[in-house]
Amino acid sequence: MKNFINLKDVPTKDLRKILNDAKKRKKKRKKLNTLEADKDQPLKGKLLIQMYEKPSSRTRLSFYIAINQLAAKSITVKKSELHLGKGGESLADTAKILSTYGDGFLLRTDSDKKIEDFSKNLTIPLINLLSPSSHPCQVLSDIFTIEEIKKKPISKLNICWIGDSNNVLNSLIAVSVKFKFKLNIGCPKNYRPPMFVMNWVKKNKGKIYILNDIKKAAKNADVVFTDKVFSLNDKGNKVKKIQDFKNYRINSNLMKVTRPNSIFLHCLPRGDEVSEEVFLGKKSRVWQQALNRVHVQKSILLYSFGKLR
């Protein structure tokens, strides 16, 4: 049994095994319908319990499909339907109940502490679907998409992030260190990645470069990432933040400084941080990016259950 919480805590060789397994499984599904199980039915008989404390479209739908394709079953419970440390039942006791009834727990939460507490008390695998500091399933799937399109290892590519420092960027930084690829971050001075993240990067000799000039950040990039400026975890001054990012919009002029065959990725939902021309343009691979969540998440589940081929 293995948890999948933060990419920095998963060995690089295991991340590569997940990506390789996802590639094989995607290839074998070409003639199967959406909810038909993979031929080997690797998680047949398993019950996965999902809980979403924050809104979700792609994560919820892609994991529903992924679980069915692995021949497992799932149930989604609401935060209001569990005690979670209230009503006289401790979170540890809730974790014991989840471990008794289910085979795995998938949590999308607004609390890093809740992820930590569950990881200490569950005796079944815990999958982090999103937390304030991490979005591991999203970013590992993005690496899969990049390598699928570029047909080369991520370590040979220049990656650029334009925008806020958030949970998606934290995970992208972690995987940059793991797979040793160059990552340029274009962001305003007051929106740099947190110190604990950059200290970890320094300790592990990561190739992370933070620039305030987005054209310098995007120059010769193979891939340009972004996310909404005002994301789900933000509780600050929305008007001020949007003003601070007014010169950090990705448009066709910015994409001209990237490499000729560069691509654009966005984890969605989108906002004003990208122009319509880029988002719907030839360089955009956002729909392929979203679809690949299914394939990679299947292999993440198999990793957590010790069933990677």
Image: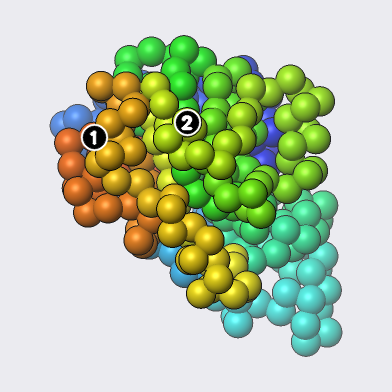
Asked if 295 appears above or below 273 in the picture, the reply is above
Asked if 93 appears above or below 268 in the picture, the reply is below
Point 50% across, 39% down: residue: 213
Q: Are marks 2 and 1 in contact (CB under 8 Å)?
A: no
State which quarter of the image contains the N terminus: top right
- Horizontal placement of 158 versus 34: left or right? right
* Secondary element at image label 2: helix
Give how far across and how far down residue 212 sits, in percent. Answer: 56, 42
Point 63% across, 57% down: residue: 131
- Horizontal placement of 83 versus 107: left or right? right
Closer to the camera, 161 or 174? 161
Give how far across and how far down residue 214 sits, in percent. Answer: 46, 39
Please give the label number shown on residue 283.
Answer: 1
Residue sticking out furthest to the bottom: 87
Label 2 environment density (alpha carbons within 10 Å; few <14, some 14–19, many ≥20): some
Asked if 112 appears above or below 94 in the picture, the reply is above
The mark closer to the camera, 2 or 1, is 2
Give how far across and how far down residue 205 sits, in percent. Answer: 74, 20
Q: Provide the residue designation for mark 2.
A: 216
Which residue type carries mark 1?
A: Lys
Which residue type carries mark 2?
A: Lys
Of the residues under marks 2 and 1, which one precedes in the sequence? 2
Please give the label number shown on residue 200.
Answer: none
| Residue 97 position by quadrant | bottom right
Point 43% across, 59% down: residue: 246
| Residue 144 position by quadrant | top left
**Camera sees residue 285:** no
| Residue 86 position by quadrant | bottom right
**Camera sees residue 30:** yes
